[in-house]
Image (cartoon, rainbow, N blue to C red):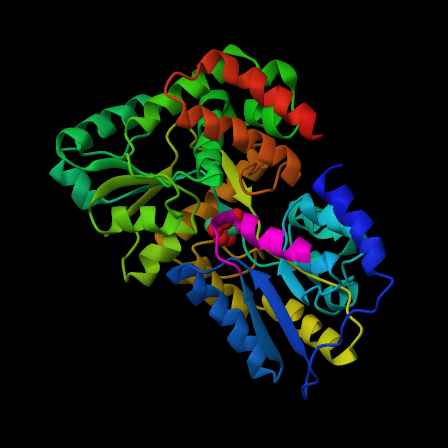
Amino acid sequence: MNVMTRLATAVSLASLFPFAALAADAKGTVEVVHWWTSGGEAAAVKVLRELVEKEGFTWKDGAVAGGAGSAAMTVLKTRVVSGNPPGAAQIKGPDLQEWGALDLLAPLDEVAQANGWDGLLSKTVVRTMQYDGQYVAVPVNIHRVNWLWINPQVFEKAGIDQAPTTLEELYAAGDKLKAAGFIPLAHGGQPWQDGTLFEGLVLSVMGAEGYHKAFVEIDEATLVSPQMTEVFTALKKLSTYMDDNRAGRDWNLATAQVIDGKAGMQIMGDWAKSEWTAAGKVAGKDYQCVPMPGTAGSYTYNIDSVAMFKLNSPDDIAAQHALARIALEPEFQYVFNQNKGSIPVRSDLDMSQFDSCAQASMRDFQEADKNGKLEPSMAHSMATNLAVQGAIFDVVTNFMSEKNADPSKAGAQIYAAIKAAQ
Ligand code: GAL
């Protein structure tokens, strides 16, 4: 029985009991479960909180620390099973379909129609936000995952004059950084961070088409191909540029190593930029963002979205609707995304108000979309359900922690793990 099946059974029991009414407030309360707890991300979510509170609603913060949200998702499932769902939670990608199938999510079509969401959002985004033809979540942003972050001062000290554009150049930069006494690649040894690196390498070695076959189609031939051996060989090589104390390190602490000049680079989605912004650093001057080497022209996307749970209190439902409406209004989209490192999810906003990394991200998103090179991020729950993602993470993380792991066997292990999880 997988987690969602267990959840479905438990939920049908829990639904025999009415959800506990939340404390009565003048204008209703919305509790929001999310995992935006790093300095930069907390500043971003504060924008939503303030706008909701400005309308007189009460915001109950349901932050659960832990990058990429696996801890938050565990808390969410426990709460739902015990009949105590929050009003809202960050739920993403195909996982929305699984929650939708449990009949727990509140439809947002009333808000969507009143505010013209269909006309504001791209088809890819609309498809992801709807279950059974109805909106069940509001998207807040688009993150790009395939980025390399660089501290140019560290590069200069190590005698590197250009950002790497291929894996060979990445290794060459790594060698120079190591020789100059820096940590070449800042990294946190957590399954989702390992997975983020891995998907970047798949995109680099196999291109958007191979990436799609591997993570969207779960194509056996691609997963066990010689190219996958190449990916794992590259992963092994990249680990030699990381420091030995990386186990368990949070992503934002890895980002801080690059900001502080201890490390030269980090491969991470553009929430990493939220830390640079919070530290008062300027894109293109204090730091550089370039596509993960070998992936220029392709774009792995990660859309953050907030889903609402069915509640009984009309006041609390009004608070949910206010949150959903505010999340797509220009005022929120500008300030939130400037803080979060992402780009607005609506395409009609003035990008001159954003830094050079965000402008590049928007351009590359549109370009990749046109050229069929826009792909959902596996490591950030956009390509598969969480069970399949977890199976991939297990193999990748084990591979990275075993010195003698064989790159030519790992692809077959992934395929077998996925099949067992499906
Ligand atoms: C992603 C999420 C981002 C960011 C990141 C690190 O999955 O979409 O918004 O929070 O995890 O925690």
Residue 131 location in percent, x, y? 77, 50
Which corner quadrant holds the C terminus? top right
Task: State left or right for residue 373 relative to residue 89.
Answer: left
Task: State left or right for residue 198 relative to residue 412.
Answer: left
Is 96 or 194 nearer to us in this picture? 194
Give the quadrant of residue 24: bottom right
Residue 268 location in percent, x, y? 41, 42
Residue 80 location in percent, x, y? 72, 58
Query: Total marks drawn?
Result: 0
Residue 73 lies within the magenta run: yes
Is residue 361 shown above or below 394? below
Residue at 50% over, 24% down:
207
Instruction: Please say whether residue 222 is visible from this viewpoint.
Output: yes
Is 26 or 269 nearer to us in this picture? 26
Residue 23 location in percent, x, y? 69, 81
Is residue 279 shown above or below 1? below
Instruction: Please say whether residue 136 is visible from this viewpoint.
Output: no
Residue at 72% over, 65% down:
84
Residue extending furthest right? 16
Span colored in magenta: 64-78
Residue at 76% over, 44% down:
6
Magenta stretch, overall SS: helix
Give the quadrant of residue 420: top right
Which corner quadrant holds the N terminus? top right
Residue at 64% over, 33% down:
388
Task: State left or right for residue 360 relative to residue 153.
Answer: right
